[in-house]
Amino acid sequence: MDEKDQQEYEKICYMCRRPESKAGSMIVMPGNMCLCHDCMQKVFDSVMGGGADLSNLDLSKVDLSQISGMPYRNLNFNQPENLDGVGDIGVSKKQQIKKKKEKKGPDFEWKDVPAPHRIKHQLDEYVIGQERAKKAIAVAVYNHYKRVYSEEVRALQGQEQEPEDQVRIEKSNILMVGPTGSGKTYLVKTLAKLLDVPLAIADATSLTEAGYIGDDIESVVSKLLAAAGNDVEKAEHGIIFIDEIDKIARKKETSSRDVSGESVQQELLKLLEGSSVEVPVGSNQKNALTPMTTVSTDNILFICGGAFPDLEHIIEERLLKSSSMGFGAQLKDRYEKDANILSHVTNEDLRKFGMIPEFLGRLPVVVTLEKLTKELLVQILKEPKNAILKQYVKLLQMDEVKLVFEDEALEWIAQEALKRETGARALRAILEEYMLDIMYEIPKDPSIGSVIITRPYLEKSGGPLIRMRG
């Protein structure tokens, strides 16, 4: 380990894998191999029989190659070629924990914090529609910055407890509900690119109760720590997005232990509320060879998202309970064609779906995403900065060919995507299908100058318009 790494990263005990922030100062052995005082004492106790007086022991005269049980006892430490990398054996770069730096001020200036309308304006350039969701995300992130800033100022002032006249800002975790392909994950991924706050995206489908095969709950925080470059303080001010949260709903009509459903919800409670958890550094699994560190989730913002299939039927059933005879009765088919029926969701509906009340209580902000319409799908095709059509245009530009889509062709693609009922994901699937032959044939003829995609070509009743150069 070079001098720069020694200044930036903590030393880790080779035997117990604890960093120096937890185990105390380290004893640096030959070859830059670090041992904490506890492990060193255990080694001497085992060597000397546990009853020897070690107060006058001179470590410089100890022959490490003769000590039974000492790691790397067969190495010849007197030869320089055997010393390369000994101190880093078993601790890869991604598992090294950064030291806590002495702060002279907050990590950022308050004037540099983007206002909610600026965050939403940046999201508008990439995400079409979903105005309500973008506003809620922008406000949540802005308040998150406020909380981080106020906590840092309070820590720098050395205030153990808040004064009576000062209010401490609490976090408001978010639950995003929307049909598949409506842009939940894409919205958060875009947010990660725009902001300078650590953000980790985890999948709830791989989580199981502790003790069973699968990822532990702490692996969610471990991913955030990795996204923050193993900087614990930076990770404690980050954002975690847990996708597919509906997959951990309580399983109905089962008598077996629900280790990947309700149990996961119960174990997530401590993270959402705020607690200190032991997480492995640079790995999703805890074992004797993985360094461990403590991360507090008090100031971590959690955003959970899920499609919640068939939730529409639960909402519709509740809304139609008030149906009665007479002029005030609601028609039974009133909500059947309501594209935004999810906007009527309540905690009662989510509990009936299988989410426990304690879990929902820790996600006070519920944001619903609208089902994409034909007009929105057309906009998604051509307007965002990273629009799908722009990607294909750029691909053919590299072959010096101009690609053009007629408006009628775009409407046909949007209409076909609605039939597939997979949201915006269907757009790429359709374009991949119809652009395959064009992408294959165009490079054959260098005299082709432009290609125009028409509706008859998509309907398989004609072909694209091809114009030659000149």
Image (spheres, rainbow, N blue to C red):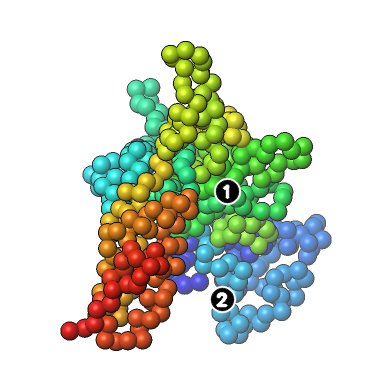
Residue 458 in percent (x, y) is at: 38, 65
Residue picked out by circle 1: 204
Report the residue at 69% width, 64% height from top.
57
**Residue labelled with disc 2:** 85
Question: Which mark is drawn over residue 359?
Answer: none
Q: Please report the residue visible at 32 percent of the width from the left and 48 percent of the height from the top.
A: 375
What amino acid is labelled 1 in the image? Ala
Query: 248 above or below 39?
Result: above
Q: Which residue occupies 66% across, 67% down? A: 58
Residue 278, given in percent of the width and then of the height, sits at: 59, 48
Mark 1 to mark 2 CA distance (whole Å) = 38 Å
Does residue 75 appear left or right of residue 21 in this picture? right
455, above or below 360, in the image: below
Where is residue 15 drawn, in percent x and y? 67, 62
Q: Residue at (44%, 70%) from the top-left corner? A: 3
- Answer with the quarter of the image where residue 385 lies: bottom left
